[in-house]
Image (cartoon, coloured by chain):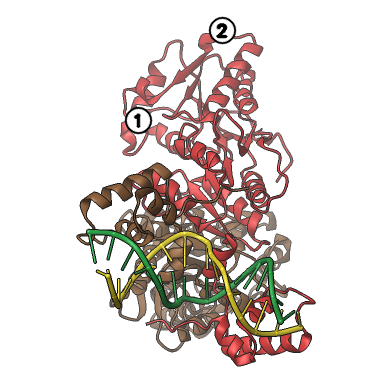
Chain colours: A brown, B red, C yellow, D green
Amino acid sequence: MRKRNVTSHDVARRAGVSQSTVSLVLNGHHGRISETTRQRVLEAARELNFSLNVTARALVTGRTQRIGLVPISPHVFHGWTGYYIEILAGVMQGIESTEYNLLTHSASYPDWCALYSDIISGASDGVLLVGRSASDPLTRRLQEHRFPTVCISSHPREGVCYAVDCDNEAGGCMAVEHLLKLGHRRIAILQFPGEETWQQERAKGARRGLREAGMAEDSLVMMTPKDLACKSLSPPPSEWIAPLARFLRESSPRITALIMEDETRARLFAETLPEYGMRVPDDLAMVSFDSTEVSERTNPPLTSVYQPLRLIGKTAAKMLIALIEGKEVSPGIRRFPMCIDVRQSCGARMYRHRESR
Amino acid sequence: MRKRNVTSHDVARRAGVSQSTVSLVLNGHHGRISETTRQRVLEAARELNFSLNVTARALVTGRTQRIGLVPISPHVFHGWTGYYIEILAGVMQGIESTEYNLLTHSASYPDWCALYSDIISGASDGVLLVGRSASDPLTRRLQEHRFPTVCISSHPREGVCYAVDCDNEAGGCMAVEHLLKLGHRRIAILQFPGEETWQQERAKGARRGLREAGMAEDSLVMMTPKDLACKSLSPPPSEWIAPLARFLRESSPRITALIMEDETRARLFAETLPEYGMRVPDDLAMVSFDSTEVSERTNPPLTSVYQPLRLIGKTAAKMLIALIEGKEVSPGIRRFPMCIDVRQSCGARMYRHRESR
DNA sequence: CTGTTAGCGCTTTCAT
DNA sequence: ATGAAAGCGCTAACAG
């Protein structure tokens, strides 16, 4: 059905030279080819509308000029997830002036092994692992294989790796500090199932914030869906929203502030709460994380701990390309600072703790 | 630096068979290989951690198992553009249960020729052209080349093509009808520079709506940035927001309603308007298009003509895969209906004209 | 049932 | 300066 593509052989024949000469010309091995031949080849190529087959080139050079993006699941693109929208924007910015295209590994993989196979199968020169579970064997395996890999947000707990993240611990601390400063004495953190590094780091920071303020341990309530006696935090909302609302209302001493890392769920919760007879910020102060448009446009706008997601995505992409191209890249976790964007969900008047971006 | 990958030769050697046998086993040519050999090969492959090189396979089969996505510019991912977020979500949904990955053509291309070359260079089996200008030679050239191509939203004005779009004309008509019904007698449409099919179709629909209501021609004011004496509709906002506000205020007879197709700009305009002493909907009714979260979360929420962008993205992806796989696909433009989501930007009480999605 | 063989289209020595 | 030839890792006839 598709026309057979013209090959460099066709060009060679037309230009009356050998195929290897065509290749030399096209790869700009300057000086090695006479100007006359060069022109002849270029013209033949143009006349035939020749376009070099990247697959064949990749096979011989071992380079595809593609970087892979591995989301924790293809579903992350289904909703308006602020985190992914921003990371993706950053990655695009990082590669848009390069010769690399972005390959999103979104096919259906029965397990991480299949994904692993697909990654190292040579479809891309390196990958960006976005929010992959730190305990995921995938990351370690890629590392062992010496496959160029940069982790975003989540990273293996041990061993060297290339990763870009933010200062989660400081962020967790900030959230608690802010709430304490506003007078809250019973603060809950809803922890999602999973063992991501950023979750643990933020929790640690939160505890530190509490300690530094000289508060009692039990001023901070760490919750998981289990505490709410619900299996997951997925829709239908009634599954977790109602239990959470009840849990908060019936808490004693009363919990007056809630930290939810997931913006989208935080928004859903804040906006549904009135149905359960409570309001943000009057009956409950809320702090979310990431501070994308999702938090910004929640009703009421959510105070949120900001991380520079675009910068993180961009940095990771550039780091990966450097790695691929064999440049010197110092391993480790590159961390960006977080800051708090104060809006209306804690009752304070809206203001910004940082320059507008 | 990177380890040499294990090849099927290595597996063959270890299993004590020929390389082609390995290939046959891996490709599941059932029945042709004895179960004993099969197991031996599979075990050897597992032991060596073998993973098939997709580049080599692609070279010989001519199939990459990738579909390309060609945005009108890589910049579309920079902001919270509702249109792209939704289309991307749809495309991901369309391919997530398939064996295809998504390749975003986001490298820097000096011109459309370079992009064209990159597309037909064999990096993907087909492409989704998102909002490419209808007058763009790229589309036509791909068609001529018989390269599997599906256009989203924009499509060539003549000749056969595979495209997925919505019923723009009906949408344009709806917007005008709605405003007329609310009593508006001077309605402006801000047309962005460009000659996209959807723009023209919507404009045509708007005119039809006017005619059908028996209104005078000049009840509809078609504007372009030129009318505002500004070069573009890009930031800084003062470049076009102030002129547009002035234009509306000074219009005579007074323009009382504005249709802006671009949600993001519509939002910016609606929210900045108070700085110029006007308010939506009191001083100006507004209707936008697409009706994504952007319109939904504007202040005030914008009445918007909805198109099922996810469904469009998903349909296009599935259509492309069918095309690639040589299935029968009837050419032409597959159009989905539009409908109007009434919110608060026209002063009416909020209600929905369609089922919740 | 399994092995031999011929490419896929390109890059890259190595001769000439 | 140019061409011949090897080979990247794989698939798919075709033999045996």
Q: Type of residue at label 1?
A: Trp
From mark 2 to mark 1, how far is it between C-alphas? 28 Å
The subunit carrying tag 1 is B
Name which of mark 2 and mark 1 comes first in the sequence.
2
Kindly identify the amino acid type of the residue bearing the numbered disc 2: Ala
Tell me what residue is drawn at x 72 percent, y 49 percent.
B327
Can you see residue A191? no
Provide the secondary structure element on which disc 2 rests. Answer: loop
B30 versus B326 height, above or below? below
x and y, in percent, of residue A167 in the image:
38, 74
Front-lying residue, A96 or B229: A96
Q: Residues within 10 Å of mark 1 (few under 14, many from 20)?
A: many
SS of the residue under disc 1:
loop
Q: Residue at x 56, y 17 (%)?
A: B184
Quadrant of residue A307 in the image? bottom left
Whole-percent x and y of residue B112? 40, 42
Q: Are marks 2 and 1 in contact (CB under 8 Å)?
A: no
Q: Position of residue A165 (x, y in %)?
A: 40, 72
Between residue A48 and residue A154, name the one nearer to us: A48
- Residue located beneath label 1 in the image: B240
In percent of the image, x 55 and y 40: which residue is there? Answer: B143
Q: Does A83 sit left or right of B350 as displayed?
A: left
Q: Nearer the viewer, residue B304 or B30?
A: B30
The single residue placed furthest to the left in the displayed view is A31
Q: Which mark is residue B216?
A: 2
- The chain that hosts pointer 2 is B
